[in-house]
Image (cartoon, rainbow, N blue to C red):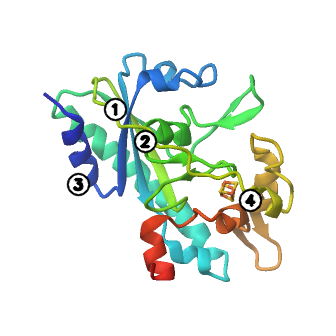
Amino acid sequence: MLTSKKVKEIMFSLGTDLCGIASMDRFADAPEGYHPLDVFPTCKSVVSFGCRFPVGTLLCKSDIPYTRVRNSITAKMDAIALDFCMEMEKYRAVCVPVPTNESQWDKNTDRWRSIVSQKHAAQAAGLGTIGRHSLLITPEFGSMVWLGMVLCDQELEPDQMKEPICNDCNLCVDICPVNALEDREIKQQVCWNYAFGDDEEKQVWRIACHKCRDICPYNLGSQNSILIKGE
Ligand code: SF4
Ligand code: SF4
């Protein structure tokens, strides 16, 4: 029988740093059309995984390393999800990878959405909790993780969900240069218009803002704190 332990062994062998499993009852609040069952009708479990985002990119004066890592880590996450699905088929488990960084327009809510929310799946799978800045915060790596997900047709033992980590200090809300976090739901387009785009002078596409990530007291997590602060 395929156990959660075995599933995680497979996922970790592919190079992930975090892995958790969510049961279907934890997606009751998913927006219409964006539930795992809307994507994969025989889905019985969701496997969420995370890879560390190199913390040094936060310390750079140049925007380029953060931008390039963000762009290349998405390919890595999609490759892991694909390899995981093929490996699971050896155990007669049918799985579907959810693209790590691909959105479609949801006319019901006027937002771009992943076909299933990576952050909500990670929260449902016990990897961490979503902070006021709308990023996932994990105990180990803070918000310095990138997320991937696979939908699975096997019933697997779910992980326990975490207690909220964000303390609602509002530092992220106050520092945002364009007030994209003033409502509980991030103003997606306002953030993207400011943070993503061409540097006219240097003529390069870059991510120019991650201030909400930088300022959060929980942005590093226990493992990155050892690296940065020697704690
Ligand atoms: S990335 Fe920058 S613009 Fe976007 S929400 Fe965070 S602080 Fe605001
Ligand atoms: S800065 Fe404060 S309010 Fe914002 S996510 Fe971090 S803990 Fe939560």
Q: Is residue 144 left or right of residue 79?
A: right
Residue drawn where x is 52% and y is 62% of the image: 144
On the image, the x and y values in percent for residue 174 come to 82, 60
Residue drawn where x is 51% and y is 25% of the image: 27
Q: Is residue 53 left or right of residue 188?
A: left
Q: Quadrant of ligand 2?
A: bottom right
Q: Are marks 1 and 2 in contact (CB under 8 Å)?
A: yes
Q: Is residue 133 left or right of residue 91?
A: right
Residue drawn where x is 42% and y is 48% of the image: 78
Dot in front, 2 or 3: 2
Q: Is residue 181 left or right of residue 85?
A: right
Query: Between 90 and 132, which is closer to the camera in this rendering?
Result: 132
Q: Are marks 2 and 4 in contact (CB under 8 Å)?
A: no
Q: Split into 4 quadrants, where in the image is the N terminus?
A: top left
Measure the alpha-carbon separation of dots 2 and 3: 20 Å
Give the mark nearer the N terminus: 4 vs 3.
Answer: 3
Q: Residue beneath label 1, please?
A: 158
Tell me the crowding category of disc 2: few under 14, some 14 to 19, or many 20 or more residues within 10 angstroms, Cα based.
many
Give the mark nearer the N terminus: 2 vs 4.
Answer: 2
Measure the alpha-carbon separation of dots 2 and 4: 23 Å
The amino acid sitting under disc 2 is: Gly
Instruction: Determine whether the residue tagged by mark 3 lies in a helix, strand or loop.
Output: helix
Give the mark nearer the N terminus: 2 vs 3.
Answer: 3
Q: On the image, which quarter does residue 159 sit in?
A: top left
Q: Residue beneath label 4, please?
A: 172
Q: Residue beneath label 3, please?
A: 13
